[in-house]
Amino acid sequence: MSPRVVFPNKILPYLLLAPQLAITLVFFYWPASQALYQSMLREDPFGLKSQFVWFDNFARVLADPNYLNSVKVTAVFSIATAVVAMATALLLAVMADKVIRGRGFYRTLMIWPYAVAPAIAGMLWLFLFNPSIGTLAYGLRWLGIAWNPLLDGGDAMVLVVAAASWKQISYNFLFFVAGLQAIPKTLIEAAAIDGAGPTKRFWTIVFPLLAPTTFFLLVVNTVYAFFDTFGIIHAVTGGGPGKATETLVYKVYNDGFVNLILGDSAAQSVILMVIVIALTAFQFRYVEKKVHYG
Amino acid sequence: MKFQGFAAGIAATITLLSTSSAFAVTEISWWHAMTGANNEVVDTLSKEFNESQSEYKVVPVFKGTYPETLNAGIAAFRAKQPPHIMQVFDVGTGVMMAAEGAVKPVAEILSMGGKQFDKSQYLPGIVAYYSKPDGTMLSFPYNSSSPILYFNKDIFEKAGLDVNNPPKTWPEVWEAARKIKTSGAAPCGYTSTWLTWIHLENFSAWNNQQYGTNENGLAGVDVELKINSPVFVKHFQALADLAKEGVFRYGGRTSEAKQIFLAGECGIFTESSGGLGDIVKSGMNYGIGQLPYDPEVAGAPQNTIPGGASLWVFGGKSDEEYKGVAAFFDFLSQTEIQARLHQVSGYLPVTLAAYEETKKSGFYEKNPGRETPITQMLGKEPTENSRGVRLVNLPQVRDIQNEEFEKMLAGEQTAQQALDNAVSRGNAAIQQAIGN
């Protein structure tokens, strides 16, 4: 017996939906179908000669060891970025929730980085940690850490994960703060009276009640790590050293726009689309079941 | 009455339109990738050309970095709206040459404008690089450069090295670099921009070593790479060893290493002659030397190859527009313009007359070292190994080489392994690109 909105007019609902549908059609279905068509073509960069090859491009991409490497890199990068960005944001949100004086000031500061464009965030981190001219790189060397993201793949990965999560922490922070405010104080007070300590209260009351927010952020952060981090990787490492930070999105760009192999690049973007659709469907199907919407 | 007036109005408009179009200037679009001071040169040249006559108007448009400009041009061609002229970097030459039908050879355009293209007036190394195997000149050389050696005189003095006698061979560079590091004169001895361009493409030409089959790709597109021969392996193993000792420092795949040199971190530096401007601007006490060579190779040094960029003309435009392009190229090849371009920008002069003119003016006496990139390139008649490297997918092959070098410099593999991998992966990529 869920409440249903009833429209007396038969056409109006479609009319109201039309702008959104048109946008989806023009900006998603049309380019996606083009990508699908391109992924089955073999073409020179100028499109002078073109040959329809069915699934040849897919077969070649999937057999390429560099592609499998890029899948691995993406998995490591996305999980690390999502975990770091969400865990740090949650910690900061819980801390900020306790602040009484200057609460607004703290929150504003925390939200600031979100306004920074990815490429600029990347440059910022690049300058701080550049092994030759970076201020913080000097510090690391002084501490005896052999820091060189230009040649060490591990260092490069740490750098892009740090830059990517730093930028996303603000967004997550905002949602966690809102989520924390929605938790009734009475529940926490009741638990406190029953003798539960702050840690116990957090894990048994606050964290479960935050689940809807956490789940939403998990989906958003996964998509962010997959797609929106291109600018950061492009600015900080360019996929290097070797292929240590070449994620799937970066490889699509590199094969398409640097190496000018449009067929392979399109095939990769189609595969990427399938992966993200599957991942989101999985999250909604299985993870959401464990979420309690209060 | 009303209707008649309306019709008369239309007739008048049509007459006006047709007459005005008869006198309209033909616009020539020029997409380029020049920034900073070099961008100003582009604007000045266009302005001067536009003021020198009234039939054509060149409109320069900045399109981003070299690869971005190339991509923008390709995308525009696919959308059937290409510019008239596009500046393409040396590495993109093979890409453009493979696109027969998309571009119009420069020699043909000049003859459409009633001008003959006289090859003998241009620097031979540059003409050879931008011509088809049969000798047809395809693009117009605009800015050419060559890699040279720079050194920091203050660091040299501190390390007890002779500032008037910079290292001439690679072993001398390694030795001087080690001395800089061990004496504590600077934290690092040697760094370099563009390992692929300087240590592979120019290294092979300068030491007369084969880079790939089919005359390094100049005679045909089916190329097998040869960069894992012993001379290359020895050179790169030396670099890898120096990297391990901290004497050589890696800056990045393109010109990032310039920052390291400008910061005074390294004493010796190899870079394009076009990079001179920034070093002059920094106020460093610098010196210039020839690109070092391998003394164990008979006949070295041979000659270096041109880098930089040339201007390509897209096909499918009207004759009138091509005449405009021809007029502009004719304007650009004037001695006076070429000599000024060379002296202001640090790029090489494209015509012999401009070179002679600069020589006569006493410019090289006042600016020692500025002639080095030219003498390097013109020193000897080029051989099959030293006319340049041309691959349909050179940007991709360079990326592969860079990836393998990075693994080598990180100590994950030896020079032999790195070059073997670069050859096998590079060959596979070339085969895919030519459609096999």
Image (cartoon, rainbow, N blue to C red):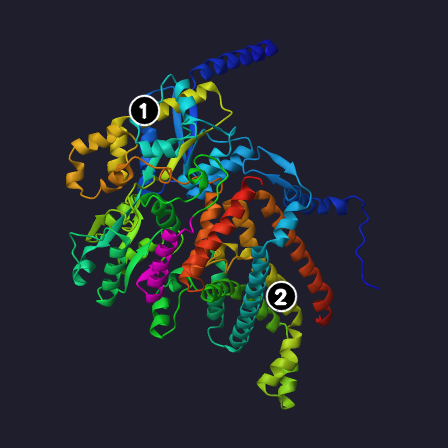
Task: Please report the residue visible at 51 percent of the width from the left and 30 percent of the height from the top.
Answer: B102
Q: Secondary structure at mark 1?
A: helix
Quick one: quadrant of the N terminus of chain A?
Answer: bottom right
Q: Secondary structure at mark 2?
A: helix
The front one of A215 and A248 is A248
User: How far apart are the alpha carbons under marks 2 and 1?
Assistant: 61 Å
Residue found at the very far bottom of the displayed protein: A195
Vertical order, B277 against A122 (above or below) = above
Left or right, B198 with reference to B186:
right
Vertical order, B17 against A218 (above or below) = above
Mark 1 Cα shell of 10 Å, populated few (<14), some (14-19), many (≥20)? few
| Magenta part of the chain | B227-250
Label 1 resides on the chain identified as B
> Would you name the residue on which mark 1 appears?
B51
Question: x%, y% of residue A237?
Answer: 45, 57
> Would you name the residue on which mark 2 appears?
A218
Left or right, A272 with reference to B179:
right
- In magenta segment, residue B248: yes
Vertical order, B37 against A250 (above or below) = above
